[in-house]
Amino acid sequence: MRQFFGKSQSGDLREAVKGLDTPQFIMLLSNKEQFEAHVKKLEALYPHVPSIGCIGMSYDTQVVEKGVSVIAYYDGVTAAANVLEQVSVMPVKYIERLKQDLKSVSSSGENTVCIDFCTGNDACVLTTICSVLKRGHIPLVGGTGDGGMVSANGKIYQDAVAYALVKNNHGRVRTYKENIYHQMGNYRFIASKTDKAEYKIGQLNGKSARQVYQDILHITEEEIQTQTFKNPFGKVNGDDTCIISIKEVSGDALTCFRQVNDSDVLIMLELGDYKAIVRDTIRTIKEDFPKISAVFSVNCLFRYLLFNENHYMQEYLQDMSALNNHAGLVGYGEHYNNRFVNQSMTCVVFE
């Protein structure tokens, strides 16, 4: 298989697809103002080609902040794209679509991945999708787009998740997740007075969540929103740690980008040597895949902001280009199998 990446910083879709002749699957990453027009034009240019899309920044060796980009696969790919609707209420109502698509692609966990773009309610969506994918051990990588809209096969949806099953007919696929944080000290917190709907943490160990966070890090209330780049919370899940980003201060509570429940055990995280961690990820992928056809990744918006702040984003993209044909999305939350994570990078590698 092969991967195509085309971009237009000005939002000219025809410029972005120049040279794309026979795609077998397409991903559209567009800006909010032109998203609807781009979806319609893409379908007109490539009718009946499975496609999904969302609003968001994208990248290969450079970042496309406000324009449009197209990532496409061809020469040995079988794909099916579709959508689950009403994700805030009952995504399982549409699960038969996914079951039928799995049959049509004749997939397996060795050669197929599910890529998804979501508008929200990510944890519920992933539980629903993975209840089907797990039967065939199909991995998943994806993320949340901006603007509350996604597209599938030329149509725009709100309150939905667009997904694609992508089968590599001539090689393996494997997914990876990168965490650039580790535990800080021995802090352990029991969350309480949480609000599931608003993603709020009211108290930690019986005290104001805001005050606990401030006292540990010796920061002002105004510094909390940016401090999460260096010190998010973590929820231990077996051998893995799920990162929980702070969105904003809400009185004495903290509103996060991921749901926290009463009695959840949280830890404090701190930023590690992210350059060394990225090099380790690249080395691991190269060892697993001596021959790489394509890499699609989702990088968290907060990672993008952190890397920019430290003048590392361009260097990061150059480092990742060593994997051959690396491209991806800057997301508002990352998906890795049945996990909804923050401040992470997830990716799928095609042999």
Image: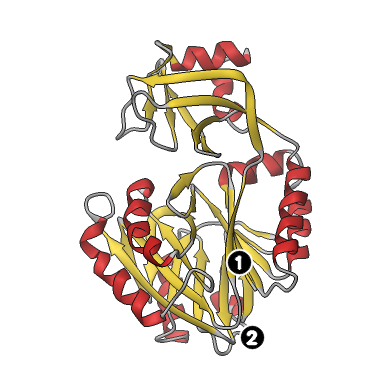
Q: Which residue is mark 2?
A: 19
Looking at the rendered image, the disc whose residue lies closer to the viewer, 1 or 2, is: 2
Residue 188's place in the image compared with 15, above or below, is above
**Going by the image, does 180 lie left or right of 213?**
right
Give the mark nearer the N terminus: 1 vs 2.
1
> Which residue is found at the position 56% from the left and 18% from the top?
187
The image quarter in which residue 297 lies = bottom right
Residue 43, given in percent of the width and then of the height, sits at: 42, 81
Residue 230 appearing in the image: no
> Which residue is found at the position 42% from the left and 28% from the top?
255
Tell which of 294 and 149 is nearer to you. 294
Q: Which residue is mark 1?
A: 10
Q: Secondary structure at mark 1?
A: loop
Tell which of 63 and 2 is nearer to you. 2
Residue 307's place in the image compared with 154, above or below, is above
> Which residue is found at the position 78% from the left and 57% from the top?
319
Q: How many marks?
A: 2
Per the model, the C-alpha gap separating discs 1 and 2 is 18 Å
The C terminus lies in quadrant: bottom right
Q: Which mark is residue 116?
A: none
Q: Secondary structure at mark 2?
A: loop
> Which residue is found at the position 62% from the left and 28% from the top?
183
The amino acid type of the residue labelled 2 equals Gly
Residue 148, given in percent of the width and then of the height, sits at: 37, 53
